[in-house]
Amino acid sequence: MEAAAKDSDLLGLYQEIILDHGKSPRNAGVIENADCRSDGKNPLCGDRVTVTTELDQQQSIADIKFDGKGCAISIASASMMTEAVKGLSITEARLIFEAVRTICSKEASVLDAMQDVGNKLAPRLEKLASLSGVRQFPARVKCATLPWHTLMSCLDGKATASTER
């Protein structure tokens, strides 16, 4: 009974984080003269997002912004993504992407995903754990991962992104 109450408390906290980011997205906008830009679209629901980044001399993400329209999950995920990857190297951002993809779409625990990214990145993944709730709603997984796929396309130098990979 105690575990069920704890799970309920975590679910409430996670919903609160997603609602907060959905209503007050961080890093919204477009970086003029960005080092990379990519547009992502989910044809199933119409969510769309543009991600722009500015890289520093060490190829770390010095700044990142997103612009788009979509459901609360998509906008919250984009907002949370910008906070999570700002200041990271491209390699570290890719590790976080894989961890988010895992916690959103597979039955892996968030703790396992945190161990996979290592001690340095685990705190950044902690807030993103709220996105794991989309596993219960398979149609929403693409909403949550669209901004992340768009960031990966951006970093790969691709102009468009797909959630199909």
Image: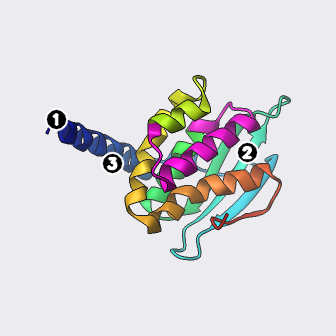
Chain part drawn in magenta: 84-110
Q: Which residue is mark 2?
A: 53
Q: Residue at x 79, y 37 (%)?
A: 55
Residue 33 visible? The answer is: no
Which mark, by number, is residue 162?
none
Please name the predominant secondary structure of the magenta segment in the image.
helix
* Residue type pointed to by label 2: Thr
Whether residue 156 appears in magenta in the rendering, the answer is no
Quadrant the N terminus occupies: top left
Would you say residue 109 sits in the magenta stretch? yes
Residue 120 to residue 67: above or below: above
Q: Say if mark 3 contacts mark 1, CB within 8 Å.
A: no
Marks 2 and 3, the one that precedes in the sequence = 3
Q: Secondary structure at mark 1?
A: helix
Give the colour scheme shown: rainbow
The answer to whether residue 43 is seen in the rendering is yes
Residue at 72% across, 33% down:
62
Q: Which residue is mark 3?
A: 15
Residue 19 coordinates in the image, percent (x, y): 36, 50
Q: Amino acid at mark 3?
A: Gln
Mark 3 or 1, nearer chain start: 1
Cα–Cα gap, marks 3 and 1: 20 Å
Residue appearing at x 83%, y 29% in the figure: 58
Q: Which quarter of the picture shows residue 39?
A: bottom right
Which residue in the protein does label 1 denote?
2
Please provide percent x and percent y for residue 37: 76, 54
Count how many numbered circles sit on residues in the image: 3
| Residue 16 image position (x, y, % from top left) | 32, 44
The residue located at (71%, 51%) in the rendering is: 152
Query: How many neighbours does mark 2 have within 10 angstroms: few (below 14), some (14-19), or many (20 or more)?
Result: many
